[in-house]
Image (tube, helix red, strand yellow):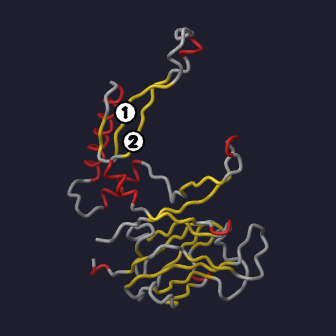
Amino acid sequence: MTKKNRTWYVTLHPSNLTPIKDALVPQVRHPRSYTLDDVLQRVSHDKSIALEPENVRHAVGLFLRKVEEMLLEGSIVRLPIGRLTPTVNGIWGTSRRYDPDVRAQNQATVRYSVSPRLQRLMDEQILLQDTPGGTKFFIHTVKDNKSGSIGDRLTPGGIVFIYGQQLLMNGDLPERGVYLLRADTMDVACHLTPDTFALCTRGRIALQLPADLAPGQYRLKVVSQCSTSPKPLKKARAYLWPGVLTVQHENEE
């Protein structure tokens, strides 16, 4: 089984809160936001699942409705990912408790606390700052389209999506493009030039990997002349994605 990616990328943003105004506050850069449909699609692609997708959807929908019912009756729901606790906020300890304006501030809500197991897994995450030196040029997600893997594996001959900022391949320097480097030696295994890309914008690159890409572990580097203005930089710059990508052929799984 392929090892799951345990890397989070953190960026720093100035705070707007008065007590700590302009202090740099860390925020996780989320690769994407998943809907229930996205989750169900991943579940249905799991080879260990013997149920039809529609049966999975029905079962999950029933589960979620039951959880809602339990929370609405005021009960605590303990799940493997954490505990959901019904609670309230607003103003309660006041002689004006029954004033409509006071009561309007009283709201029902649900507090979530992470389960011990999930917390242990989160403690193992590797936290990396993804915008060193304040640069706007970076990669935050590498997705292997065939396997659906994010930041973990590559499929020879498959399509890869690279997400980030300032990835546009404007300019004409020959060193522009996407490089795969052998993780142990950092030698260049292949250089994919912009003319071979299926898609290239400031925020996304889509390309096809060589079908004969050898199994092993790789680092990914992008070289670009893109800047914040329409005019390309005179000198290309490189961004080395901090993760390690594994290439293995289907018959090796």
Q: Residue drawn 70% across and 40% down?
A: 18
Q: Amino acid at mark 1?
A: Thr
Q: Is residue 19 left or right of residue 153?
A: right
* Residue in the picture at 45% in, 76% down: 244
Say which quarter of the image contains residue 162. Answer: bottom right
Whole-percent x, y for residue 72 in the image? 36, 26
Name the foreground residue: 167 vs 239: 239
Q: Which quarter shows the C terminus?
A: bottom left
Residue 113 circle label: 2
Q: What number is the disc on residue 215?
A: none
Query: Is the residue marked by circle 1 packed among few (<14), some (14-19), or many (20+) residues within 10 Å?
Result: some
> What SS does tag 2 mark?
strand
Q: Which residue is located at x 53 percent, y 19 percent?
A: 91
The quadrant in which residue 240 appears is bottom right
Q: Which residue is mark 1?
A: 85
Q: Position of residue 196 (x, y in %)?
A: 57, 82
Q: Is residue 132 above or below residue 35?
A: below
Residue type marked 2? Ser
